[in-house]
Amino acid sequence: MTDPQADIDATIASLPCWTGRIAIAPLEGGITNRNYLVTARGERFVVRFGTDNPTHGIWRVNELAAARAGFAAGISPEVVHAAPGVMVSRFIAGRTLAAADFTDPAMLRAAIALLRRCHAAMAAHLDIPAVLFWVFHVNRAYLRRLRSGACRIADRLDGFAALNTELERRTGPVTLAFCHNDLLAANWIDDGARLWLIDWDYGGFNTPLFDLANLAANASLAPDTVLAALADYDGAQPDKARSDAFAALIAASLLRELLWSAVSEQDPPTDFDYAAYTETYARRLAEALAGLGIAEPGTV
């Protein structure tokens, strides 16, 4: 019988990006990929294992291109090696953020500034044609997949589909920039002097307003804080049309996270409680819809 961890250690040790002895330790927290910390010749690196995942629209060639562009734009750590199924980046000494960190006005301003840099600079450094990430299309694809097999929330899918259409209508016309599209708190690192963005699995062209909405949704920001964040990004108070679009995208982001988790329940990629995660986002979506005056489509 083989030892899976021994196989992983052997694979990491065989990578051509180090010389001499190395130390390997798992990194906790990933809910899609497996990550390891490697110390080599006094330097530290993150080894990230992950293959293409068509179900979730993850293509590693796009992730690698975005990670390299992020480094060139001063947003992300340097990628020092890549091969099919594995990417090695320099380790950023710092702490991974938690949702509560964004209630600190200084931290939120720093995050908004980094997103502004991402949206302005990333596209110039991309070396391949990039994908489009449109949350409403993502949600429709998830709904089709959920309908095609056993699904714990099958009785709610029609309601979610109608909600998705209504939120897309409320969003209206948009402009495009290269966005991160997965702004969970765990994808931010504070090194004590500045913030970094990591994990570009879903990087692609989108409306910058979605990145702001995604951050607000995942951090559970209060309504007044949400509008202040938008005003900070825009450099002016938003008008009603922009505020309404922002609110619709916050709800769409919550719906996307709920559907992502429901799909992950069908074939869990890691040892994680996806069912509980689905229910958490269902509750948060219901709260957001109440603020929009939209009836909640059933219960989980």
Image (cartoon, grey):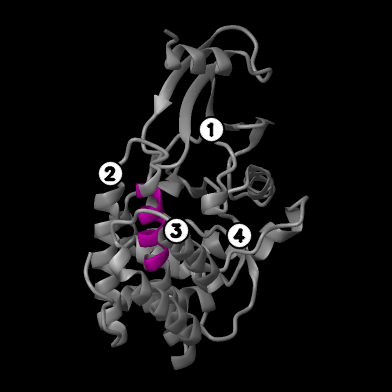
Amino acid type indicated by mark 1: Arg
**Do tag 2 and tag 1 residues touch (Cβ < 8 Å)?**
no
Q: Secondary structure at mark 3?
A: loop
Q: Secondary structure at mark 1?
A: strand
Tell me: 173 left or right of 127: left
Measure how far apart labels 2 and 1 are at the Cα level: 21 Å
Residue drawn at (37%, 66%), measured in percent from left and top? 254
**Circle 3 sits on which residue?**
148
Measure how far apart labels 3 and 4 are at the Cα level: 37 Å
**Circle 4 sits on which residue?**
118
**Circle 2 sits on which residue?**
273
**Do tag 1 and tag 4 residues touch (Cβ < 8 Å)?**
no
Residue 173 percent coordinates (x, y): 59, 85
Q: Nearer the viewer, mark 3 or mark 4?
A: 3
Q: Nearer the viewer, mark 4 or mark 2?
A: 2
Q: Earlier in the sequence, mark 2 or mark 1?
A: 1
